[in-house]
Amino acid sequence: MIPPAAAAAFLAANGWGGADILPVAGDASFRRYFRVVDGDRSAILMDAPPPEEDPRPFIEIARWLCERGFAAPVIHGADLERGLVLLDDFGDVRLRETADDLSERETGLYEAAIDILVQLRAHEAGPLPPYDRSVLHREASLLTEWYCPAVGIAADQAGYDAAWDAVFDAVLAGPRVTVLRDYHSENLMLIGGGDTLGLLDFQDALAGHPAYDLVSLLQDARRDVDPALESVMLDRYKRITGAGKDFDIAYHVLGAQRNAKIAGIFTRLWKRDGKLRYAALCPRVWRYLERDLSHPALAPVKTWFDANIPADMRGDPMVISGQ
């Protein structure tokens, strides 16, 4: 976590000359983060090096969110050629650890997170690419591309594609909103340790169905969400927005699609990138996926899974493969 060579000059050009640069835990991408400290003020330096990363979507979406009153980081400076961005420091207090350590706050924190999604639904989707059928298929296929080979399964790809195609109509109809796509407990910050939830990691946002971010939050790959809490929060969202039965179907279709995608991504992070801890998160993802597959609307997809991936092959791919 050595700061990029251009960091000092970039910070000086943006009014932070001589500041200390301290590493901050990163994410599953090529991006790195540093806390810039100058006396009693601090900011975050994002290092998103080209060509692997492009910080422009993050900057554009952050500004779109801020203009509409959402707590996204304000951008204080950017060098797009070097992939450097200076932004607000929301601190280190995340929803995840707070809900884990202070169970009495869990419900209130999730209510606040749900209410942000209600507010997001009130706005027309931003100028974003569509979350269309081709994207849904491409993401779902990460499971057959990475997970299945890792555990020694030669999956029926044509049947997989056909099964998903039979259920995607449910999520391609209805309202389009800005879908942040990684809206979960580790990307929701309690700004300054307070009660306001700050938004992070939204650079991959698309215009799609509002149920997707609910799935990200309530079927969290990094934290066990009790099914009772999931149900209460889903009911809260539907009560406020007036969403009905069609929304329930979309929620479970997108739940299955997202969890299949994540099982593939986490396997890729282990196999390709050497990030071993992600494989161990897959059993939780499979539990969510199997719950979604039990919904009648997912019958074609469940049939494929039952025929192609036996129950004892659903879990930690590193353990299953004996590696």
Image (cartoon, grey):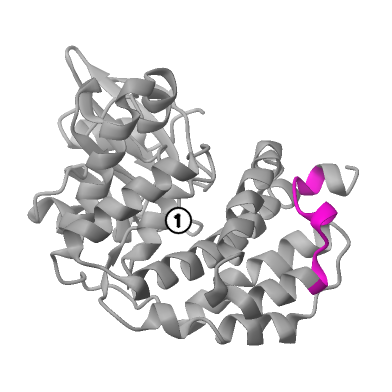
Residue at position x 38%, y 27% from top?
99
Res. 32 visible in picture: yes
User: Based on the displayed image, in which of its 4 quarters is residue 17 positioned?
Assistant: top left
Mark 1 surroundings within 10 Å by alpha-carbon count, few (fewer than 14), some (14 through 19), many (20 or more): few
Residue type at mark 1: give it: Glu
Residue at position x 68%, y 55% from top?
268
Q: Which residue is mark 1?
A: 53
Judge by depth and name the residue closer to the eye, 209 or 230: 230
Q: Position of residue 112 (x, y in %)?
A: 22, 40
Q: Which stretch is magenta?
A: 307-318
Residue at position x 39%, y 21% from top?
22
Residue at position x 83%, y 62% from top?
310
Q: Is residue 311 magenta?
A: yes
Horizontal placement of 129 versus 51: left or right? left
Q: Is residue 183 above or below residue 112?
A: below
Q: Is residue 313 magenta?
A: yes
Q: Position of residue 87 (x, y in %)?
A: 23, 39
Horizontal placement of 83 versus 65: left or right? right
Horizontal placement of 104 versus 161: left or right? left
Q: Secondary structure at mark 1?
A: loop
| Number of numbered discs on residues | 1
Please identify the quadrant where the C terminus is shown: top right
